[in-house]
Amino acid sequence: MCARLARKQGFAYEVTGMRILIVDDETAIREWIKFSIEKMKLPDVEEIYTAANSRDALTIYKEYYPDLIFVDMMLPNIHGLELIKILKSYSEHIQIFIISSHAVFDYVRTGLSYGAAEYILKEELTYEKLTNVIKDALERRNHLSEQPVLWKYNDTPFLQALRPRQDVIIDEALLKGYNITLQNQPILILAGDTSLLSALDVLRLPARIQLNHGAYFIVKDSCHVLLANLVGMNRDVGIREVLEHLKSSFSFLLGKGNVEMGVAGGWDGLASVFQRTLCRLQMHFYEDEGVWEGYPQENVDEIIDVCRKKIYLKRNARTLSGYRAEIDRLIMEIYEKKPLPIDKVKYGVAEILTIVIQNIAQTLGNEVILSARDNIMEAESFERLRQHVSEICDKIDALAEVRTQMSSTVRLAVAYIQENLLQTVSLEDVALHVNQSPDYLSRLMKKELGEGFLDYITRLKMEKAIELLRTTPMKIYEVAEALGYANVSYFSELFRKRIGVNPCKYKRYY
């Protein structure tokens, strides 16, 4: 979603009327809330939308970006709690009110922890209560827009329209559809990592220069972008002078190479300048000082998929030598086809290493996989990523012998668990299958596998979840159900703890 920039040093903001979304599968409740809000005749309320399920709600959100959302708990498709978590991942500034017929403490606690403003029982939602909720929400929204902070939002379809191969004309109608107020005059594009926002807090512009109609986007975890009109330039202070001033300021604040910038003359040149700016920013990761005018055209997913298929064909190999050539070839191809998107490169390399670890030494604990993933994701440059891959491969090779040390009992237990992973498997079931007591089997698995029975089962299920998210069109709640998790929120939290990101974010990357 795009941002309306709050007034701060050199910036101007513009606030439109509040947009409200009501999400409830009960028609009577949706229509009553909508009718009641319309009856209030509040001038600051611009539009009211309704949705009967979570999927429709997400579609409406991505198109109209409501500021205030009422969410029922028991929704079709996606549970209300999961919907709240998804919405809050899009924007931290959405005001969400839970409306429910159930006074369940776990729902209250979880909903508020996800960022909901209040939990309201439907039986207590009177016209007077609703009026106070709407007025308080308007007051909070107006107060927030006056604060000296930049509003942050995630990637939007508008930025997708600026990408290569998009035959889209940037004009007033398109911008208005995305609630973006950029004017057809010089537009500054600033691209950087997460430190860009903190730098903007202390950035000083040349005298009489302002950045108006600004929008701040989080394109990916490692890429933040500000688009804003440059206002106040004259014969004494032109675009070149402004860019020199900004380069000098950012070099001082963040160091060389952390920010790239460009200026488009107006709407017509915005897409091409945007592409070149992001391309130059990506190149810093690869530590290449060359001038790259294009935008990354290669599809990272295709490169990773080719490597994944080759590794699958070698899945019976039990030493690293069977995979090392493919891993080295992948790293070389990524560098040759730079600048590929950094986040996708990291996720892809981490996934390939995880597959190799599972193939070579399934006895390695989850700690090894998480450690490998963390090292890859935290690499600050391509050379460091390459070093991490080499170090991880050496560690895999050294620990691969663990597999050959498994007792026949644990081998049988592991095989049984893997064959029945999509069923409900208990320690007692496995113990009966291998003709051992549950306590003895639990101790033996902990000793030989390095993790307890429950941790082992959970790790395998999360690995299966990754496979389903990557290779099927299944929704998050469908994956959760397939793996035996009735509560999709619990599944999402387990996935986040094990993999490092929630399943929604993982699926968006792939």
Image: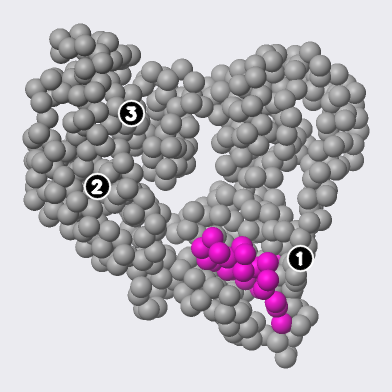
| Amino acid at pointer 3 | Asp
* On screen, residue 497 above or below 5: above
Whether the residues at callouts 2 and 1 have beta carbons within 8 Å, the answer is no
Q: Quadrant of the C terminus?
A: top left
Name the residue at 65% across, 16% down. Answer: 104
Q: Amino acid at mark 2?
A: Leu
Residue drawn 13% across the image and 24% down it: 411
**Picture quadrant of residue 266:** bottom right
In the shown orientation, is residue 166 left or right of residue 397?
A: right
Q: Earlier in the sequence, mark 2 or mark 1?
A: 1
Q: Which residue is mark 2?
A: 353
Task: Please determine whether, in this image, residue 122 is positioned above or below residue 178.
Answer: above
Q: Which mark is residue 8?
A: 1
**Quarter where residue 20 is shown:** top right
Residue 286 visible to the viewer? yes
What percent of the width, then of the height, locates residue 42? Answer: 90, 36
Region of the chain picked out in magenta, as a range: 180-206
The residue tagged 3 is 455
In this picture the colour scheme is one colour
Answer with mark 3 or mark 2, whichever residue precedes in sequence. Answer: 2
Q: Considering depth in this image, is 45 or 449 the residue closer to the camera?
A: 449
Pinpoint residue 318: horizontal percent, then vertical percent: 9, 40
Q: Is residue 189 a member of the stretch shown in magenta?
A: yes
Q: Nearer the viewer, mark 1 or mark 3?
A: 3
